Amino acid sequence: MSDNEIYTRFKLQWFESPRAGRLALVTMDNGEDHRKPNTFGRKALESLHATLDEVEAADDCKGLLLTGKPFIFAVGADLNEFAHVDTPEKGRAASSGGHEAFLRLHRLPFPTLAAINGAALGGGLEIALACDYRTLSTGAAPIAFSEVFLSILPGWGGTQLAPRLIGAPNALQVIIHNPLNQNRMLKPKEAFELGLADRLIASVDFMDASVALLERLVTGAETIERAIPSADDLDEALANARAFADDKVHGATNAPYHAIDLIEFAARGGDLEEGLSREADAMAELIPSRQAQASVYSFNLTQQRVRRQPGKPDAQARPVGKVAIVGSGLMGAQVGALFLQRYEVPLVMKDIDERVLASAREHIEGELDKRVQRGRLDAGKAGFLKSLVTYTTDYAPLAGSDFVLEASPERMGIKQAIFADVEAVVDEGAVLATNTSSLSVSEMAADLGHPERVVGFHFFHPVAIMPLLEIVRAEQSSDEALATAFEVSKTLRKSGVLCKDTPAFIANRLLMRFNGAAIAALSNGNDFAEIDDAIKELGLPMGPFELLGFSGVKVAFHTAETLHAAFPDRFPLDETFRRIAESDVEGIYDYAQGRVPYDEVAAAVVVEEGAERLTGDQIRAQALEAVAEEAKVMLDEGVVHDARDLDTALLLGAGWPFFMGGPCRYADDTGLSEKLFGTRLVAAEDRAFA
């Protein structure tokens, strides 16, 4: 191995304390800045062993402090090594290797203190728990056990040490509930209040204060006592966690259930070494599993690949010093609030209706006020940002805008008229973007003097939460316009995925094919809840009818009409779906009566004569085959560069769980793509960077 190889090294320095004697100060550092966090792979664990050899050999060592490089403590296992863990034996060894190293730290015969100075995730938090004490900087974030989100579990002692330290309910919160709740991370104050740290210290003098605490612990000048966690509410906490896991993953991945069982073992007083052995057994099953391997693939797509902006042209982006939003309804107001907070430049909100503008102003200013209330924005700064916004029914204030986004209703004539009016007041280099979810961007731009300036820029609802942004290259789109769109996406902290101008683009086209197959089961006599439940057994957060209630039946049916017009053979218009969309209800279920469809919705269903009800397996199979077929068609048509783009879109835009890996990876992993096409969809080489 080269000395220049990037891996986390445990660097030892000796500190002679006048009060406490000789202290070992160990810093985890991979030699890179915070953009490449400390991770633990085989070489890192070897470095830890070597450092502990030196510490144990020093007879006069009185204490040890473990910390990280600036802004980073450690963020856990090196996921790049997971692809090589393809057997249970390798999975068990990967877990046991961490146990062996961390137990040496845990068993040192003098006080050990983890000074958590920055991000601490997964194995980073586990190595901190292996120490006797923990200090936490007010600037350290995020803090989390994210493993269950990746269909594994804290496999280096976390399931055993956390409940012993903070109690089972809190351990279940950070190991089960938070990861399955969109991988929620903890802030320092939250982590401290849960008991994960003994002291919360201001970042300005964090290291000095941490060393001073270790000195006092060594000399006995200070002791830290912790209450023994109560087991009074253990049964209820475990039952709630299992019900929560059922609701989130529907049994499609075993990781949360194994983690709950392990936490229970520790909470009921199980032997630590036996618990670690059980932890290793669980990891032997989980790491090589389809779900965990797909999760690592998904993580790499959404956290690494998408940041490289696949397909971004090598062109100069236009600087954005002024933004305009035309159409200030629900989506327009959300997008306007995002632009204002991220860009902090003059913003024009345009609409034909003063009442809509008033609502948009209420939303935009309300979002700023919320940030002030949460302590995330200074009141004076909020006032300044509010002053940057112009609310108008005229086009003249749009003059000087560099980036104009239209967010009007899904009607081609309206959008074409808006772009014509905008073009009359902005310069020829200004980029015009449309938030259309299904209409042709090329047709929208066709009659403009400068159609090359137009791009698709499709956000997903709710804008503040959903990370996906579909960037659409129309037939005339210039490289400069697309480069600008990618830069805007980056500034907005959205994940831009490029696609060709095609009906419904990526996510909605794939979802309509997938959900359409499930909706068709109504004509076989299957009921709404039965179909939803069958689909959710894949691990999806919602069934097709629950999703329709969230996104809007009429909006979805409009997309279905667009796709039917373009591809009638693959997107037939379901007449039951039409009747539901024409009813006066917005959703499917009347939740006031339980998960029961509205009377108008139930009445819209017509069961085909002689039809046989489908089993759950048949419903899932039809939906999966349909989405796989559509993915193959889209790849053949060149809608995207690579199957990884399709998977990214559904992972980030439709809430597909990481353990499915997206429709293409799932079809490959389950053999469906080989069965249907005789080949895999995800090629070994990423064509977006070929």
Image (tube, rainbow, N blue to C red):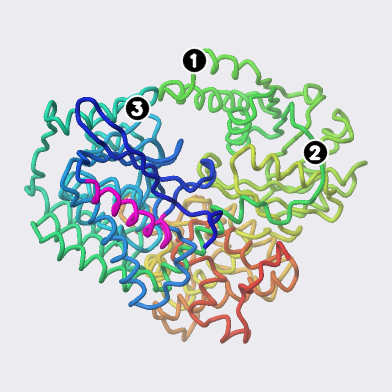
Q: Is residue 414 above or below residue 204?
A: below
**Residue drawn at the location 35% of the way across and 58% of the way down:** 148
Secondary structure of the residue carrying tag 3 is: helix
Compare marks 1 and 2 and give the one earlier in the sequence.
1
Q: Is residue 481 above or below residue 364?
A: below
The reply, left or right, for residue 570 in relation to residue 428 is left
Distance from Cα at disc 1 to Cα at disc 2: 32 Å
Magenta extent: 40-58
Secondary structure of the residue carrying tag 2 is: strand
Q: Which residue is mark 3?
A: 206
The type of residue carrying mark 2 is Val
Distance from Cα at disc 1 to Cα at disc 3: 28 Å
Marks 2 and 3 close (CB-CB < 8 Å): no
Residue 664 on the magenta segment? no
The type of residue carrying mark 3 is Phe
Q: Which residue is mark 2?
A: 431
Tell me where residue 343 appears, x and y as whole percent: 64, 29
Q: Residue furthest top?
A: 380
